[in-house]
Image: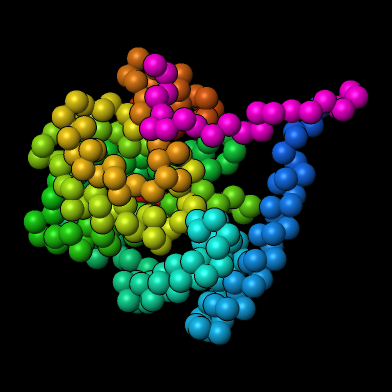
Amino acid sequence: MEGKTVVDQQSECSIYAKTGKKTECAGVNNDHGRNQEELKKTAQMRDLLEKHDPTSKDYDDQTIRRFLRARDLDIDKACAMFLKYLKWRKTFVPNGSISVSDVENEIAQNKMFMQGSDKIGRPITIVFGGRHLCNKKGGVEEFKRFVVFGLDKVCSRIPQGQDKFVAIGDLQGWGYSCSDIRGYLAALSILQDYYPERLGKLFILHVPYVFMTAWKMVYPFIDEKTKQKIVFVENKQLKSTLLKDIDEDQLPDIYGGNLKLVPIQDV
């Protein structure tokens, strides 16, 4: 099966209503209404946030809207999530960013890269799971710093008007020595709790059978919205599946494209 998804992928505007010679998406009016609701609730959420934490003024409406969407436009839940994020950011990233010197042991594993954009302009990051080993020197805390280091780098490349990035998780060579459930759950928590609505799609490639043992342990902790974005790609359909979302001139050369991978620290 080509591009096997974790759950059925949501269709984009699959129902159309024809009006004369023009064909319009039947969901346009609904989208407009939702956008108006988002704008209104974003303003309300900003007022509440600034009363609780004045530093929230430093964040734009687009950022606030991501947290609102992550909580299905529930203002109270979105505010709680955003305030938790502010507290975490001040504690975990007190200097505003993670430096290379803070994650040297993780960078030495040469496992995270960037290159290219998909067809709608979302930057692409590639993570080689088979190169990940439990960090005995820095422990899970350094790994968590590396996750934030990487996500900040990727998000800094997201163009204006876009919110998300695309990830490719390549499990070539993955074995039990790479299995790090504690690390996986920590990374998942950071992504879902502090970078909501950032992941656009995750392609998982070269999946060995033994990986499914680890996957079954992590899967229950993945929220439903994230599950919708995960695609397991069969080896025989690898390039054709990626080409549905990524033009060949933007595809990394290791997957049949034209671009060389750039280490995340060099982005």
Vertical order, 37 against 116 (above or below) = below
Q: Quadrant of residue 138?
A: bottom left
Residue lying farthest right?
20
Question: Is residue 252 found left or right of 54 in the rendered image?
Answer: left
Residue 251: where, in percent of width, then height? 46, 30
Residue 27 on the magenta span: no
Depth check, front residue: 30 or 140? 30
Q: How are the colours assigned in the image?
A: rainbow
Predominant SS of the magenta segment: loop
Residue 223: where, in percent of width, then height? 39, 48
Residue 18: where, in percent of width, then height? 82, 25
Q: Quadrant of residue 171?
A: top left
Residue 219: where, in percent of width, then height? 29, 42
Question: Is residue 135 found left or right of 230 in the rendered image?
Answer: left
Question: Is residue 250 found left or right of 261 in the rendered image?
Answer: right
Highlighted magenta segment, given as a residue range = 1-22
What residue is drawn where x is 79% and y is 28%? Answer: 17
Q: Can you say which quadrant of the picture contains the N terminus?
A: top left
Q: How many marks on residues?
A: 0
Question: Is residue 247 found left or right of 233 in the rendered image?
Answer: right
Can residue 257 be seen here? no
What residue is drawn where x is 64% and y is 73%? Answer: 44
Depth check, front residue: 209 or 133? 209
What residue is drawn where x is 32% and y is 19%? Answer: 235
Vertical order, 225 against 59 (above or below) = above
Residue 3 on the magenta span: yes
Vertical order, 85 against 241 (above or below) = below
What residue is drawn where x is 13% and y is 50%? Answer: 134
Can residue 171 be seen here? yes
